[in-house]
Amino acid sequence: MSLNSEAGGHVVGIDIGGTNLRLCLADANGKLAHKWAAAIPRASPPEAVIDQVRKGVDESLAATGIARSSLCAVAAGAPGLTNVDTGMVIATSYLLGWKDVPLRDLLESGLGVPASVENDVKMAAIGESRFGAGSGVRNFVFLAIGTGIGAGIFLNGEVLHGEGWSAGEVGYLIVPGTAEAPADFGEPGQLENVIGGEGIRAQWRAISQENLQATEIFDRASRGDPLAAGVLNRSALLLAYAIRNIAVILNCSLFVLGGTVGLSKPFCDATQRILDERNERIRPRLTRSTLGADAQLMGAVALALNHRKTGV
Amino acid sequence: MSLNSEAGGHVVGIDIGGTNLRLCLADANGKLAHKWAAAIPRASPPEAVIDQVRKGVDESLAATGIARSSLCAVAAGAPGLTNVDTGMVIATSYLLGWKDVPLRDLLESGLGVPASVENDVKMAAIGESRFGAGSGVRNFVFLAIGTGIGAGIFLNGEVLHGEGWSAGEVGYLIVPGTAEAPADFGEPGQLENVIGGEGIRAQWRAISQENLQATEIFDRASRGDPLAAGVLNRSALLLAYAIRNIAVILNCSLFVLGGTVGLSKPFCDATQRILDERNERIRPRLTRSTLGADAQLMGAVALALNHRKTGV
């Protein structure tokens, strides 16, 4: 296999989600030339997703008139435990439960350029570090709060992977207000069970007949609805405990909130208010992701650009 | 000032405690040639402690017949927030509340050899990493449980300092069973307030007239005393929550317990049992410090030896 790794060309960033595939073509400065997206059919095997990626790359090159020979690296984020050294997706609860999928090799074979892979939340943290709210900051925690909760931890300018690639699985934290009983991987974690998107909806359903999304509940709270404010305050308190404990352990003050629920301004503001009122020496500073839904895609661009520079 | 930094000689490891000063003379392999200790008079200013260190070094050299010219580096652990880069003890609640003490410079002026300084708990973790239970392990957490509770966190073979030198202040963790109210630096933290040495004694005093140390209560529990077993089990549960949460965040499985309370076998065993029974994917492995009360001293030897190799 010959891999094109010339300097100065373009890269592709790939965001493999549980149900959607997104990719983008960017130049050597990370400037986007084209974005492309498609639904991933249920239970797609890895090879089918790689075929979709090839299609997306082909269409992006065609749409922009950029030559295939200018493509010099790709990187992909995947929603599961990912070994960055071997390029394997070890396990995921999405995508029909991929196990030990050699994603990097499949991408390199399929596209003919060097590839890197990373867990999706860590990839989003890399995006925030390079292009977003963590830019220029050596220590910060990116906190993705959607259905689940996960963290991408930057220490001394490097993402923390942990001894088994699962650092930052903070949805499994136990704090006052969460269940204390064990929860295993694949099951929702103790923290995300209460303040992940589904957990917040469940808090709401316990007091209301109405079917609302987490962000809708929080918006309603900010408009003065007392029932919704109760859910918001309880959720913010638990998030404040989790953030404070992470900050105590790591001595890290900046937390970047992302994910559909984490991006909610009322949620971020309420949590910051609790932390400020506590007035402890450990005083985390919260900010919402500036890249939003593109954090992971931009992380993939950053990783591909980095790879291009340092070589395979 | 001329600093003797020839290779091949001896180093001095120094353990500055709240009430005691200990130091040791070791050869280039870390083999101890002599140990020396003295009480630190109450409210000693830094200069007085340095004078004591000089006396200890003089007496150690005299006792062993090792030439002063063979001494090539020293390192000292101090019980407070310590900036390793500038060599300053930023703050400590011991020793009359030293603030911004240039400990490294004072040691270098006083002894005429290169010096390094480190926080005491992190120094003990360095000792365990080089000579003890963390030897050969790139990721582990040393947990010192005495009157207070602190952690020395090793990630990828390096001790984690954090952005303000306070990483690992885990006595301030909040878990189910601790107070949730704010606690500030200087005050006992939420976790240590319940399962630090004084916290455990307070648990006991709430149910018994007898005045016992934490380790005595735990020994009694292991001999079948049901009241003592209650205190042991409650303390072990809180420690298990804290350890599990740290392990979730860092994806680190080895925890080395040190400090007078942490070295208690019944405490370590009871905590491990709780973690094992939870049977979660995150399953921390606990082991007691093999260096015990010498962990910090041996950490200082390791740091001095390291410094000697890499130069000032």
Image (cartoon, coloured by chain):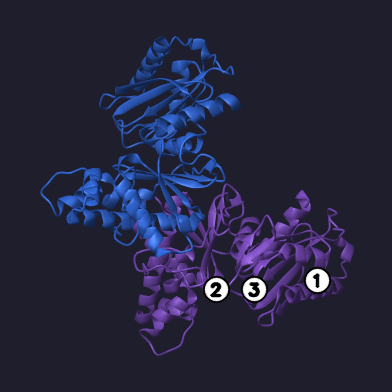
Chain colours: A blue, B purple
In space, the residues marked 3 and 1 are separated at their CA atoms by 17 Å
User: Which tag, 2 or 3, sits closer to the chain's start?
Assistant: 3
**Residue at 60%, 75% in the rendered image:** B94
Q: Quadrant of residue B243?
A: bottom left
Q: Which mark is residue B17?
A: 3
**Residue at 27%, 27% in the rendered image:** A43
Could you say which is closer to the camera, residue A88 or residue B144?
B144
The number of numbered badges drawn on the structure is 3
| Foreground tag (1 vs 2) | 1
In space, the residues marked 2 and 3 are separated at their CA atoms by 14 Å
Tag 1 near tag 2, CB within 8 Å: no
Q: Is residue B284 visible?
A: no
Q: Badge 1 is on which residue?
A: B57
Could you say which is closer to the camera, residue A282 or residue B2?
A282
User: Disc 1 on helix, strand or loop?
Assistant: helix
Q: Is residue A146 above or below residue A24?
A: below
**Residue at 52%, 34% in the rendered image:** A85
In space, the residues marked 1 and 2 are separated at their CA atoms by 27 Å
Q: Is residue B245 above or below residue B228?
A: above
Q: Quadrant of residue B19?
A: bottom right
- Toward the bottom, the furthest residue is B209
Q: Amino acid at mark 2?
A: Thr
Q: Badge 2 is on which residue?
A: B260
